[in-house]
């Protein structure tokens, strides 16, 4: 199927109508969505090269970062520490932001790294709400504070990272896409192709290639996927009814329906600042709708999963929130992730290291790639500096640069509980996932705010996790049978082994990353 807004209008009428309120009539976003859906299905291939084009050398660097999204933080950090860095992106550098939420303490590495002062970090927070809630089906609100409660000014963060790059001499190469790269004993030759319509091929030499190409990287291999659509919505009804927006409350995970067509749709809604920049009088929320699934099942969800999800978003939004609900800015994407029940994607070869979404390092429960990147860039960046200094850029040394905390390895398996069951036995019971989530979250809530918060921030110790498991099973004795519907026998075995490892790890080594 080729792209035409007219064709899409017939297939996705509510989406096209809502997008038509955007300044350009929504055409650019619809086109981008359409290509993202197409690319994601084929995915992860590099463009083919015209053999007649000669590559123009641009220069030699210590590090080349492919993809100038949030991974730009690596370029800024390494350059600040004296490394010669170049960054290229098929779009502008530091332009592809989403609406990012995080907690205050997770932002600490931004100042600890020396990239920003504490005052600059504080300026990045547009709004902080009082409480977060999770609610499933007709269940109650499970309140928690300090989780995803800070709305980050993503545009300013990326702008400042770009400014730091310029200040520290990073070579910025916008509108170039990766053609290919070749390895030799001394380094990597990276070839790029212009995306601004000019038929131009360029060539860079580097000691190390950082792959920050996101979910569509040719190396991204993830076993879970979370198609996510939504954006900033204006003119919500204000109040304390679940159908209204409370400007003091963030909705971390909320379901309004049960499983349909093997999908459990989940809402997320965070108050954000109004057009006037005023947090208190805001009627604006960033609202997402998403579902989790095993990535090999994505093909079963039609040829255009994100566009189909958007159509559902606009159809069912009035069941989540009331108001005239005007779309101000769409945000969407495929969020990749790992169950951690299989080996994580590591360095694909010597001298190439994956960062950000390409490495699939998301929070298992909240799928926060931004949070996860901010937590991990500092130890990884320091490790890269050591390896560059020692000229130890072999696959093994790069792979050892990052070890996942044991808590993440256990929590990863829980994401499968929110994705469709493997076994068809009982899979069509609409409340199967809501029941599990209610059992899990009522147990967490009863355990107290501190363990509940730490759990949502991937920072749980073995004894607490076991207490959580036993508590959920007591409340909902069916839980073990349901777990077996969602996990294969080998996944259960691996998961139990991970739990044993977590149990044996001293709590001082389980810290949040
Ligand atoms: C809708 C949505 C909401 C989110 N909300 C949150 C949140 O609230 N909190 C949170 O913690 N996380 C959130 N995330 C996750 C977070 O945004 C990502 O984890 C983060 O942006 C990943 O950054 P990245 O640099 O790895 O990848 P990306 O931001 O995807 O950047 C990849 C870059 O590579 C470029 N590129 C791709 N292929 C090529 C190529 N072949 N050649 C050249 N350039 C290329 C792209 O143009 C892009 O600029 C959200 C994600 C989505 C989709």
Image: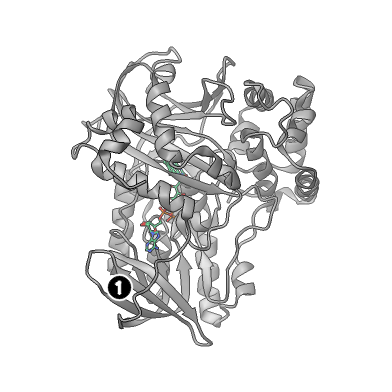
Pinpoint residue 170: horizontal percent, then vertical percent: 32, 71
Residue 327 can be seen, yes or no: no
Residue 504 falls left or right of residue 216? right
Pinpoint residue 190: horizontal percent, then vertical percent: 41, 76
Pinpoint residue 246: horizontal percent, then vertical percent: 39, 19
Residue 481 falls left or right of residue 23? right
Q: Nearer the viewer, residue 277 or 55?
A: 55
| Residue lying at 37% horizontally and 79% vertically, measured from the top left | 204
User: To which quarter of the image does residue 189 belong?
Assistant: bottom left
Reply above or below: 203 against 246: below
Residue 33 falls left or right of residue 371? left
- Describe the element under mark 1 as helix, strand or loop: loop
Q: Nearer the viewer, residue 328 or 376?
A: 328
Reply above or below: 361 against 316: below
| Residue lying at 78% horizontally and 26% vertically, measured from the top left | 473
Reply above or below: 367 against 440: below
| Residue lying at 54% horizontally and 75% vertically, measured from the top left | 386
Q: Nearer the viewer, residue 111 or 25?
A: 25
Reply above or below: 110 against 148: below
The residue tagged 1 is: 169
Q: Callout 1 environment at 10 Å: few (<14), some (14 to 19), or many (20+)?
A: some
User: To which quarter of the image does residue 197 belong?
Assistant: bottom left
Residue 113 can be seen, yes or no: yes
């Amino acid at each position: 199927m080729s792209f035409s807004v007219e064709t899409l209008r017939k297939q996705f009428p509510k989406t096209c109508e809502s997008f038509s309120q955007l300044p350009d009539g929504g055409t650019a976003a619809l086109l981008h969505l359409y290509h993202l859906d197409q690319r994601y299905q084929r995915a992860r291939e590099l463009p083919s090269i015209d053999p007649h084009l000669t590559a123009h050398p641009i220069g030699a660097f210590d590090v080349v970062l492919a993809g100038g999204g949030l991974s730009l933080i690596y370029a800024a950090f390494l350059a600040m520490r004296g490394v010669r860095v170049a960054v290229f992106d098929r779009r502008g550098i530091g332009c592809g932001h989403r609406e990012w939420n995080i907690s205050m303490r997770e932002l600490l590495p931004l100042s600890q790294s020396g990239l920003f002062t504490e005052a600059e970090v504080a300026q990045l927070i547009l709004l902080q709400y009082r409480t977060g809630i999770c609610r499933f089906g007709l269940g109650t609100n499970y309140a928690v504070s300090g989780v995803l409660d800070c709305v980050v000014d993503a545009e300013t963060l990326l702008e400042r990272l770009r400014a730091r790059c310029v200040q520290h001499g990073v070579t910025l190469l916008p509108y170039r896409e990766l053609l290919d790269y070749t390895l030799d004993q001394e380094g990597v030759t990276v070839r790029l192709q212009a995306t601004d319509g000019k038929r131009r091929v360029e060539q860079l030499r580097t000691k190390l290639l950082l792959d920050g190409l996101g979910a569509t990287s040719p190396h991204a291999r993830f076993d879970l996927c979370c198609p996510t659509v939504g954006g900033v919505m204006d003119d919500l009804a204000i109040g304390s009814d679940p159908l209204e927006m409370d400007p003091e409350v963030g909705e971390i995970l909320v379901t309004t329906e049960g499983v349909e067509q093997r999908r459990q749709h989940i809402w997320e809604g965070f108050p954000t600042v109004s057009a006037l920049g005023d947090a208190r009088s805001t009627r604006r929320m960033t609202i997402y709708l998403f579902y989790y699934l095993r990535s090999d099942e994505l093909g079963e969800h039609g040829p255009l999963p994100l566009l189909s999800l958007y159509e559902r978003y606009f159809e069912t939004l009035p069941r989540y929130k009331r108001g005239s609900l005007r779309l101000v800015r769409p945000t969407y994407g495929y969020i990749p992730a790992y169950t951690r029940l299989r080996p994580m994607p590591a360095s694909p070869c010597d001298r190439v290291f994956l960062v950000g979404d390409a490495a699939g390092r998301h929070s298992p429960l909240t799928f926060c790639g931004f949070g996860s990147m901010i937590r991990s860039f500092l130890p990884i960046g320091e490790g890269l500096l050591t390896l560059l200094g020692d000229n130890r850029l072999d696959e093994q040394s790069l792979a050892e640069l990052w070890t996942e905390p044991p808590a993440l390895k256990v929590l990863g398996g829980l994401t499968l509980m929110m994705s469709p069951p493997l076994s068809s036995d009982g899979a069509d019971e609409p409340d199967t996932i809501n029941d599990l989530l209610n059992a899990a979250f009522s147990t967490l809530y009863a355990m107290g705010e501190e363990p509940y918060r730490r759990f949502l921030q991937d920072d749980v110790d073995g004894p607490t996790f076991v207490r959580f498991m036993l508590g959920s099973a007591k409340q909902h004795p069916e839980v073990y049978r349901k777990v077996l519907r969602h996990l294969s026998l080998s996944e259960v075995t691996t998961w139990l082994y991970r739990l044993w490892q977590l149990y044996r790890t001293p709590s001082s080594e389980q810290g949040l990353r």
